[in-house]
Structure formats: structure tokens, C-alpha cells
Image (cartoon, helix red, strand yellow):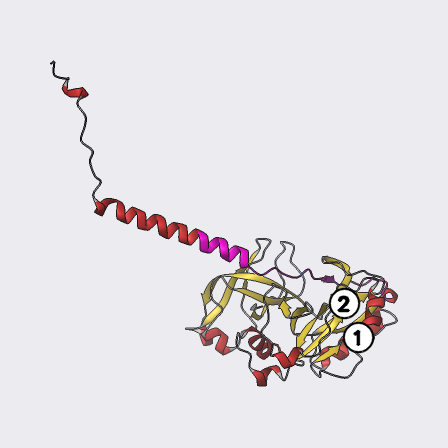
Amino acid sequence: MPTAPKSLLPIPARRTPAHTWRPLLALLIAALAQAQAESAAATDAPTPPALMLAEVYRPGVDLSAYWVSEKLDGVRAYWDGTHLVSRRGTRLQAPDWFTAGFPSVPLDGELWSGRGGFEVLSGTVRQQEPDEAAWRRVRYMVFDLPDGGGTFGERLARLRVLLAVPGNPHLALVAQERVADHAALMARLDQVVAGGGEGLMLHRDDAPYRALRSADLLKLKPYLDAEARVLAQLPGKGKYAGMLGALEVETPEGIRFAIGTGFSDAQRRAPPPIGSLVTYRYRGLTAKGRPRFASFLRVREDP
């Protein structure tokens, strides 16, 4: 019987050594686990509530069409009928007694602990384990009824009835008033600012609740403010040697500039980290679009 050519003889199967494929399998399993975790995280990510946003007030607006209230320097919060939620969609861990007796309908408002109390309030609402004593200094100030339908004036009337029943001292309606003209509006602004307030809000009486930024809601402050991302920490000189001199920041529109004022000595020793979002005050823009007289206000740490 003829012998088959060597090239046609069966080739013995070779087993891949375990030390070769086991590391690859481990990497594959780790990659699959990471993908599943990222998918779950994306699914569980909080959904921001659909909130009404304000434009900046400018002279010339027909003020007879608006209600005016104090702009509270607090933390915007949405009551969904069961829980308080931040504007980013994070559930705020308020004590049960704080929300006891809140109505079962959605509310739009501000968590507030009085003029000048923002820094302490911000830390209070971001804690996962609520500080009972700190929450007792907080009130939920309501200014709108998102699902109420109708105009703002009609929603305001319903809120007055809804919140008129004596009960939870931590729930209150923001006072709304009318002003005759721009001069009266500015006089009211001066009064609020002199008392330590931040500014004014203007709600258009005939406006529906719309989850967008429009002239239905206006804000008025003695200065403008905005947010920017920290790019670098520039070293100080002279009395600030060894500390922060200024922050190099960039706006969402891509404008880069430096903020060198508004910091306390403690903030200069431990400045906002690179990548953080900061709020700054300014007074108008230059011809190149840079903020004029920019001054640091705070690190943006919304929950």
C-alpha cells in the first residue's frame, strides 16, 4: 500500500498553553464587567427635572405684566410630590419631618436658610446623611406650580390656597408683588440688596409654565454672574507669594480669562481645583467678549 505524502498526513492537534489564554480570558471578563457597570450607571443616572429658566432683565420691559419677588440665594429644588430633587436630578436627603405635610403635587422652589446662608446651606443639602440640626434652619420657599396649568397669576392664586393651611413651618410661599415702573423696581432692588439680599425675580403674569429659558422669567441683580471651568492656578506675588494669585478659567463659549479678586486668604491657600466649575461676578463684557471686572464668587457645587 503506497505511503501518503508527508504533506497529507494528519497534523497532531496542539494545545495552547494555559499561561497564554488565561490572562486573555481574564482581560475579556474584566472588560465585559466594566461595560455592564457603565451601562448600569448610565441607566441609573438621575434625570434632571424640566424647570423654567430665567433670562436677564433689561430696561424697557413692560413691568405691568410682571410679578416681582426677592431672588433667594439658595438651592433650587423640585418637589415631585414625594421627594425633593435638585435641578440636576439628584434626590436630596431631607429628613422625613422636613417634608411632612408637603402637598402631593409638584412644586418648584428654593431651599433657603436666610440671606447670606448659602455656603452652609449648600453643605447641608449635599450630605447623604441629613444633619437634623442644620435642616431645622432651612425652609422650602415655593414660587411656582409646574403642573398647575394656566397662567402664572392663576397658578399663584392656587398656591396661596394650597399653602395657606397652617402646618409645616419649613414650607412657605415666596412673596410676590407688583411695581409701577422701572424706578420703583430699582428702588425695590436697592432695598433688598441693602438688607443682604441677592436681587429680584420677575414672573410674567400671563405665562404658562414652560421648561425653557425665556422672558417669561427674568432675574435682576446689581451685577451679572456666570460659570467657568478652572484651567490653571496662577501663583501669587507680593503678599500672596506662595498662595493663589489668580485662576485661569474658560467659559462654555471658549472665552479664556483670569480671575484675580474675590478670594479669601483661606481660598488662596486652598484654591478651587483644576477642572472645577466656579461662579464669578462681572459687570458687562469687553469688545472681545471677556467679562469686565470679574470677581470670584464661589465654587459651583450643586447636588
Circle 2 sits in a helix, a strand or a loop, which is it? loop
**In terms of image quadrants, where is residue 45?**
bottom right
Residue 238, how many percent across, how many down? 45, 74
Q: In which quadrant of the rendered view does residue 199 lie?
A: bottom right
Going from N to C along the chain, the mark reached first, 2 or 1, is: 2
The answer to whether residue 54 is magenta is yes
Q: Which secondary structure lies at badge 1? A: helix
Front one among 238 and 108: 108
Q: Is residue 117 visible?
A: no
Across and down, in percent, residue 37 comes to: 45, 56
What is the x, y in percent for residue 31?
38, 50
Number of residue marks: 2
Marks 2,1: beta carbons within 8 A: yes
Question: Residue 157 is drawn in which quadrant?
Answer: bottom right
The C terminus - image quarter: bottom right
Q: Residue furthest top?
A: 2
State the CA–CA distance, disc 2 to disc 1: 10 Å
Q: Residue at x 84, y 65 (%)?
A: 205
Q: Which residues are magenta?
A: 36-63
Q: Residues within 10 Å of mark 2 (few under 14, many from 20)?
A: many
Mark 2 — residue? 145
Q: Residue at x 81, y 62 (%)?
A: 149
* Quadrant that contains the N terminus: top left
Q: Residue furthest bottom?
A: 133
Q: Amino acid at mark 2?
A: Leu
Magenta run includes residue 24: no
- Residue 83: x percent and y percent? 64, 70
Q: Amino acid at mark 1?
A: Leu
192 vs 267, left or right, is right
Q: Where is mark 1, residue-wise?
A: 162
